[in-house]
Amino acid sequence: MTSSLLRKLRILFSSIVLICFLFVFADFRSAVPEKYINSLLYLQFVPSVLKYINLMTMAAGGFIIVLLLTLLTGRTYCSFLCPLGIGQDLLSRIGGRIKRKFGRFGYKKPHTIIRYSLLVLTLGTAIFFGLYLVTLLDPYSIFGRFMTYLGEPVILLINNFLTWVLGKFDVYTLHHVDIRGFVPVTYTVPVLFFLLVGSLSFFKGRLYCNMICPVGTLLGLISKVSIFRVKFNESKCTRCGRCAIRCKSSCIDFLNYNIDVSRCVNCFNCIDVCPEDALSYSFIGSREKPAKTEEGRRKFVAGSLLMLSGITPGTRSQAQNGVPVPHSESTVKEPRNFPVCPPGAGSFEEFTEKCTACSLCINACPNNVLQPALMQYGIAGFMQPVMDYHRSFCTFNCTVCTEICPTNALKPLLLEAKKLTQIGKVFFIKDNCIVKTEKTACGACSEACPTKAVYMVPYEGNLLIPETNVDICIGCGHCEYACPVTPYKAIFVDGNPVHMAAAKPEIKEAEITSPEEFPF
């Protein structure tokens, strides 16, 4: 095929894929059903591999389709299906429009040692030490972090501005949404990778894909034996060099009629620009010269980013809900032993091995209780989701995170099972409770507890004080979030390293009886 139709089809298809991913991560109203999200994630390479290793079922075998597609067509995955790759194409095009010299590439020799060393290092650490490098370098996870930490706040700012504008005209189609913030240090990785990937894309096209990305390197190896590929017709070629200038992978050596198929991402720009129709995408023939070389020369150029200012966690007023406001700060630090990982994880060990920190669950959590971890799980679990009950609580009737996880790090749970999954246990610190310290009636924790694992018992005079039943506690954190004392809570949840089954709470009949006759 020599027609520019190939390029148009690629742009159309990749645009649809990118829009779908943007909508998923920007969906703060949870309008997209989980089944459609799972369908979209099915062909994402690393999440599919991890899910298949865990489940050993073809229902999670999207990566096999990607491998077969690569054997047949070359690295079409990188241009058609990878949201990070499609985003790089967009940035590269913008760079070429702003300053055309930045969009002109030309053939360059590859950094073979760097790209294959990173691939071996990533695979080796994944096998022997865990998924930390996979988490950092997986293109889908990088894209997910971009959207969750940097993209969603911008979308919410736009939404809130439009809400304010429409409100002036008494139009209330939209509603204000609080912009959540994370611990500042967790922005380090997304920002650094945004600068790295963004600047390389802006100035150097697909250099990141062909030098650093382990998925790109692996698929590039397979594409060396692909059946269809871009190739030269030497009898037509005039060696004008237009194809090499347009090639964002810098993989076309037009002087020697060589195309490095391990770096070619099948964007078809070269076919579109060739005035002689000397390039085509077709079945590899015996006369075609094999690709010999690979590309790359890295240049780190700082980009621009200022989207973090003004992102602050939502605050709440205890007094508005009838909860007493403490007059002094609590003094006893919460003796936490373990963090609380989301329901469906099974255990810390299982969870941290499979989670790639893509942040999709953090983004999708309707109650914003999931936050990126710092060192709660250790260095290997940096930026993986952890429950933060000082910010929010796990909704009793919600299983969104378990349904949306692309790697099966969070296994799907029926709602009935989730309500009996104990992810942590409640502990009460009497010396922090304002019932004791300030002789003030409270009971916020008891009122919030959905299983009544926290209940009130007589204390002094007419005062009641909390007491706990850890057997029926599921560790949802509602009590901890409701507790008004700061900085240390009077009641908190300590995580279970291995999730357990909670006892089913007893449902007691109401002791209040109705009078025989109504008093009115």
Image (spheres, rainbow, N blue to C red):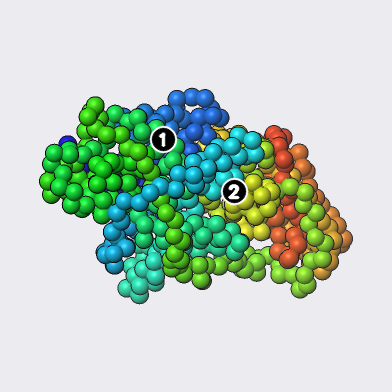
Residue at the limit of the structure toward the right, as seen here? 460
Q: Secondary structure at mark 2?
A: loop
Foreground disc of the pair 2, 1 = 1
Q: Which residue is depicted at the point 23% across and 50% down?
A: 243
Q: Is residue 191 above or below residue 329?
A: above
Q: Nearer the viewer, residue 488 or 467?
A: 488
Q: Which residue is mark 2?
A: 384
Residue at the limit of the structure toward the front, as seen here? 256
Query: On the picture, is 55 further left or further right than 82?
Result: right
Q: Which kind of residue does numbered mark 1 sit on?
A: Leu
| Sequence-first tag of 2 and 1 | 1
Q: Nearer the viewer, residue 98 or 38?
A: 98
Residue 60 placed where, x, y %? 46, 30
The quadrant where residue 154 appears: bottom left
Q: Which residue is depicted at the point 50% across and 29% down?
A: 52
Q: Which residue is depicted at the point 50% across and 67% down?
A: 308
For the N terminus, give its image quadrant. top left
Q: Which kind of residue does numbered mark 2 sit on?
A: Gln
Residue 377 placed where, x, y %? 68, 47
Q: Is residue 6 above or below residue 480?
A: above
Q: Nearer the viewer, residue 307 or 278?
A: 278
Residue 365 placed where, x, y %? 52, 50
Checking the image for residue 221, the label placed there is 1
* Distance Cα–Cα, label 2 vs label 1: 30 Å
Q: Is residue 340 above or below residue 350?
A: below
